[in-house]
Amino acid sequence: MRRLLVKRFESSIGAFYESLKNFEKTHTIVFEFVKKTNKYILDRDLIESIYEKSDEEIEKSLEEYSLKIKNGQYPKNYKVYDFSNSENKEEFLNHILSDLNLFKGLIKKVEDLDFLKNDPKLKKLVEEIKDKIEKEPKRKIVIFSEYADTIKYINKFIEENNLFNKRVLTIFGDLGKKDVLSLYENFDASYKEQKNDYDILLTTDRLSEGFNLNRAGMVINYDIPWNPVRVIQRLGRINRISKKVFDKLYIVNFFPTEKGATIDKSREIAANKMFLIHNTLGEDSKIFDIDEEPSPAKLYQRLQANPDKQEEATFYTKALSIFSEIKRKYPEVINSLNNFPPRVKVGKKSNENEVLVFFKKGKVFVVGAKVDKKEKDSFYSLSIEEAVEKIKCDFNEKRLELSESFWDTYEKIKTYKEYKYIPSSQQSLEEKAKNNLKTIIYNHLESEILEKYEKEISQHKNFLKFLLEDIEEYGTLADYTLRRIANLDFSKEKIKESLDEIAKIRKQIGDDFLEKEKQKYKELQKEIIVAIENQKI
């Protein structure tokens, strides 16, 4: 729900505001319902039937379900929690009330900020449209959003500010005959009876299929769906094979803010899926970026970062920005990357003598060595962020010939025992998980607990050792699993609950998970991407 709220916030403050009001309404109804009836209804089948639907469809389904409950038309499969004789009723109501107050507070903040008068995203949208219409008045524009609430919000802003001389056609929800006719007359180049009443079409993905909108030469994606096929379908409305109207078509994308992207990840999710579509189908339309064609030699693919960590996501953004700047200023450099040999070795000036080798074995990792003629080489592992700072150079900087000592250091690095670089934020999580595993594996528990649960603990011992080995040697466990292990509590009050959690983890990932990961790891080929020698001059 948090991700859904952030996604709607990144689409528009209007969609976010409507969600807050819906949550407030739902919580109010539930609060009053429980208070009055001493019951709470949970329908798992309902959740399972709607969780894969779009956000709009989910909200609609919940409204219909609420109406059925209100009218006494209960579905076949539901569960009723009866609080008549429960001590938990007040606690449950207090939790609902706490959430309700939170939503009310957020609603007031949004209303106080009065975004409709001062929305930077809307202002940028209007600015871009005015500029394009002034330069090319015949090029109509289609604005897409996932959410009807966002379309309503944009339309309200346009109407209240008297923008675009009432030449905006706004369509969401069910299509009437008048709407369909207006679409054909104003946006379909193949329609016989052409009109020119509208310059802009403001709509949802409801129109992303089945309509020719090729009198428009620009698509503006006001938000990015997780499913990139929808984005392709949006573009497909103006990119029609049947009748060419413009030599060039434009796509304008509004991406989430950097902070919101760490939760929403719509660009990342859609771009990753788009990459697969490109590779599988050979699709050559550029959707998210002007140079979207996939190539294994591209720099941004080498600089892989864990998207779950904000600092690494920020690094990815910075790296992509640097890459885009190089691409803009020196396109010949980017084009030449595809022709580079698989193992590039180069020397450059620096303030210290050092060799850095970038490897790829599943993920990219870096090994460095300080080169000192008087002492032995010292080896260490780096994060990619640290390594990039060491290899940056100006465009005009000349390459240096590799030194005599390079090859000896390079060969030693190649045989250096691989080290799994772990960001500091994850280290504490792994340490907690390791400590918990060692506590139960080596029986560092109270004697009373050992006596009572000895048999149950011994049943899991081998599995627990596999978990510990993975953390110490391979690091394949997901953060979610690590967190579950780190949160285990072996006190008298919590030991039973923790053993149940271990059993759940074991059932979910299996006793043979580590052998599978070891096999995968063996099959991976360690590939050297590039080696850089920093030379002190």
Image (cartoon, grey):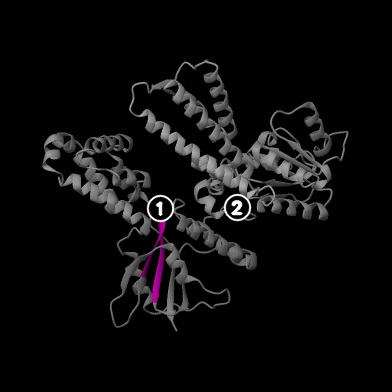
Q: Is residue 367 magenta?
A: yes
In the displayed structure, 209 sits above or below 525; it is above
Quick one: quadrant of the C terminus?
A: bottom left
Q: Position of residue 100 (x, y in %)?
A: 49, 37
Kindly identify which numbered label has been placed on residue 500.
none
| Quarter where residue 511 is shown | top left
Could you tell whether 362 is left or right of 393 in the image?
A: left
Q: Residue at x 83, y 38 (%)?
A: 186
Q: Residues within 10 Å of mark 1 (few under 14, many from 20)?
A: few
Q: Which residue is mark 2?
A: 293
Q: Position of residue 407 (x, y in %)?
A: 37, 73
Q: Is residue 461 magenta?
A: no
Q: Amino acid at mark 2?
A: Glu
Q: Position of residue 405 (x, y in %)?
A: 36, 78
Q: Residue at x 54, y 78 (%)?
A: 398
Q: Is residue 417 visible?
A: yes
Q: Earlier in the sequence, mark 1 or mark 2?
A: 2
Q: Which residue is mark 1?
A: 362
Image: magenta residue range: 354-368
Q: What secondary structure is the stretch in magenta mostly built from?
A: strand
For the residue labelled by badge 2, is the local secondary structure a helix, a strand or a loop?
loop
Residue 488 versus residue 468: which sits nearer the camera? Answer: 488
For the residue labelled by badge 1, is the local secondary structure a helix, a strand or a loop?
loop
Q: Amino acid at mark 1?
A: Gly
Residues tagged 1 and 2 counted as in contact (Cβ below 8 A): no
Q: Residue at x 82, y 54 (%)?
A: 134
Could you tell whether 418 is left or right of 26 in the image?
A: left
